[in-house]
Amino acid sequence: MVELLVVITILAVLAALGLVVGNKMLAKGKATQLINNLRQMAPVFNTYAAENQLRLPACNGPEIQADGSVADMQWNEVLLTYLFPDTDAARFKTEQWWDSNRSLMRNPLFEDDASPNPWTPLNPGYGYNLMLAENYSLMVDEGIPGEAELLATRVPTGALDEPSRTPLVAPYDNYYYRLNESEVGRFSTVETLQRFMTDGKLPILFLGGNVELLSPIEYGTRELDEMPR
């Protein structure tokens, strides 16, 4: 009986260790996939700019549809139209499409039941840097417009003279982000955002196509939230 209990105890310990190690390996694999997804977004941004008077897509603004009509689209939907050109853009708003298609536009670390903001087709777990539009508006002496106009601003790439220091996309629980002082604090209080980080660092896609791992504090220390100047 004693020998049997010892064996059972050993098996239980091994099972627990296997579960912990397995979960860590799974999370690490998803983190690697997340970084690869970001890298693959870079050429799609470049293609869009080349076809749209060297401007980046808006966070959420009017886009010409295949039938010639105009509809408001989020930046992630715009990129999906390039990745899946034969798909009706309206399908990108449905969970059925996401369930049946593997897309780099879905953050593998963002869960359907994440709190306070869960995954949805229009909230795929990557945020677009709204500070680009805000800083650009200040740079051309127009002041900061209202939120709707700001979201619809398509920033010209010619205004971004430091591509390798111009952040575009970061894992986030909203489709756009402002990584200012207040949002830096969210990374220490929101469990969902903490899961997006690897050893306290967040992968950031820059306009130049480079992806860097930075802590939210490093992001501010390097004054990346002030780009373009």
Image (cartoon, helix red, strand yellow):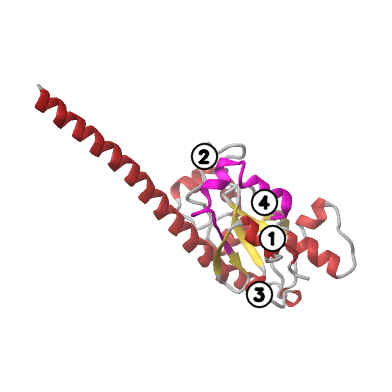
Q: How far is the residue under mark 2 from the one under mark 1?
A: 29 Å
Circle 1 sits in a helix, a strand or a loop, which is it?
helix
> Which tag, 3 or 4, sits closer to the chain's start?
3
Q: In screen coordinates, is 221 left or right of 32?
A: right
Q: Nearer the viewer, mark 2 or mark 1?
A: 1
Tag 2: Cα neighbours inside 10 Å, few (<14), some, or many (≥20)? few
Furthest residue to the top? Answer: 1
Which of the pair 196/169 is nearer the observer? 196
Quadrant of image for the C terminus: bottom right
Q: How far is the residue under mark 3 from the one under mark 4?
A: 23 Å
Residue indicated by mark 3: 163
Tell me where the magenta segment starts and ends, as one range: 176-204
For badge 2, the amino acid type reads Asp
Report if the CB atoms under discs 2 and 1 are less than 8 Å apart: no
Q: How far is the residue under mark 2 from the one under mark 3?
A: 33 Å
Point out residue 147 in the picture as x, y percentages from the top left corner: 81, 51
Residue indicated by mark 1: 220
Q: How far is the residue under mark 4 from the one under mark 2?
A: 23 Å
Residue indicated by mark 2: 112
Circle 3 sits in a helix, a strand or a loop, which is it?
helix
Which of the pair 94/108 is nearer the observer? 108
Residue 214 showing in the rendered view: yes
> Which tag, 1 or 4, sits closer to the chain's start?
4
For badge 3, the amino acid type reads Pro
> Which tag, 2 or 1, sits closer to the chain's start?
2
> Which tag, 3 or 1, sits closer to the chain's start?
3
Residue 184 is labelled as: 4
